Image (spheres, rainbow, N blue to C red):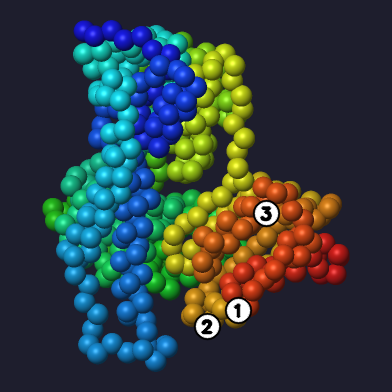
Amino acid sequence: MHTLTVDVAVIGAGTAGLAAYRAAVAQGARSVVIEGGPYGTTCARVGCMPSKLLIAAAEAAHSAQHGAAFGVHIDGRVVIDGREVMTRVKSERDRFVGFVLDGVASIPEEDKLVGYARFIDKNTLQIDDHTRVHARSIVIATGSSPAVAPSFQALGDRLVVNDDIFEWDDLPASVAVFGPGVIGLELGQALARLGVRVRVFGASGRVGPLTDPAVRASALEAFNQEFALDPAAQVEAMQNEGDAVSVRFTDRNGLPRSERFDYVLAATGRRPNVAGLALENTGLSLDARGVPLFDPATLQCGTEPVFVAGDVNDVLPLLHEAADEGRSAGRNAACWPDVVPLTRTAAMAVVFSDPQIMLVGKHFTELDPQSIVVGEVSFANQGRSRVMLENRGLLHVYAERDGGRFVGAEMVGPRAEHLAHLLAWSVQQKLTIAQMLAMPFYHPVIEEGLRTALRDAETRLRGDD
């Protein structure tokens, strides 16, 4: 048994963990990073990048199949080779993972411990059966994993999660997707555009992260033009039938249906990776998920030298937030008890569906309807959107009645990923609607649609609506 004494021990070598380790080292702290699974980060291996590779293939297929409206005709049918699609997805995925591995390789070998950590006490970790680490401070950055309800387990090898999809050698003929959140929408639509028969089932009525009822209704209408999506489905039964799964349900028209699918994709949420950490040995108070209670500002667990960063804490499970949290947790762990709060950037979320979804700043349900005005634009007849035949969707911008400060937006529509950045910057700078309208808007661009929504908000602020 090897014994090691360090200033900071970081559990997990994902985005948050690597950022925490480097931040702690930058403070002059003797630090180690501990990883039991493969290096490579969730984003590179099974998240952001492979999903965007699948989406890129789907967009290519969709464009090839829908050129007739522009007078562009393909001689013969479009052939989608599932094996070629998945070969590129996995090859490019491995390339992105390689970039992360290059970064890990730059960490001194003596600072990397391979194995699964469990707490002996709040300052002591046991790594498998080979190393005991005594640390002045510890950062928990163990990430999250797909959460699969027990009712799905009986489906056996017909059940998949998003991690599994990126190991496929070929595309199946059909997939039932449970969960119309970010993962379910992105992968469900991509598979549908690649020729897979897809039906998406929801339970709560939600469509992606949208909370604004009007924007959500616009999104639901747009997606149902391509694939079946019921955000409040009534599923009576699911049964494994060997090489397929039979799903009995009531469709949106109230009619009983039964369909067979090659696979069921469970995209029903994620759970924090805390099982096996033996957190009960720390004396820390734990929440219902088994995660230590912590301050979202400092990421510190009570007054103890333990910090929680990244997806495991589920504050904002996004890569850029994980990186920011990791840096903050690493710095605070190195400097404990001198901890400082993390200055968070404006909230921003994007779904890479088509049309895309974005939320910025305060969500609709976080606002008092009496204290705000809502500016609106439909993209049905917005100039650049119609030119590109991407004229679907709705944007709502929210502004305070008192003073006109822009506080948030929700949107489904074309190129929303770019508008999200402009609007997040506006929230962070605390701009008013008037100040935003004083900025230049080129012609013809999607951003002119944003200007229309801002003008609508300005009219309502004046009381002219």
User: Earlier along the polypeptide chain: callout 3 or callout 2?
Assistant: 2
Q: What residue sits 16% from the left and 57% below the top?
A: 169
Place of residue 1 in the rendered image (x, y in percent of width and height, measured from the top left): 21, 7
Q: What residue sits 47% from the left and 19% below the top?
A: 28
For the residue labelled by badge 3, is the local secondary structure a helix, a strand or a loop?
A: helix
Q: Which numbered dot is residue 444?
A: 1
User: Earlier along the polypeptide chain: callout 1 or callout 3?
Assistant: 3
Quadrant of the rendering where the C terminus is positioned? bottom right
Among the 4 quarters of the image, the one containing residue 295: top right
For the residue labelled by badge 1, is the local secondary structure a helix, a strand or a loop?
A: loop
Q: Which numbered dot is residue 272?
A: none
Amino acid under disc 3 = Ser
| Residue under label 2 | 387
**Left or right side of 400 for 335:** left
| Distance in Å between CA atoms under marks 1 and 2 | 9 Å
* Residue, far bottom: 71
| Residue under label 3 | 426
Label 1 close to label 2 by CB (< 8 Å): yes
Residue 240 in view (yes/no): yes
Place of residue 244 in the rendered image (x, y in percent of width and height, measured from the top left): 18, 57
Among the 4 quarters of the image, the one containing residue 124: top left
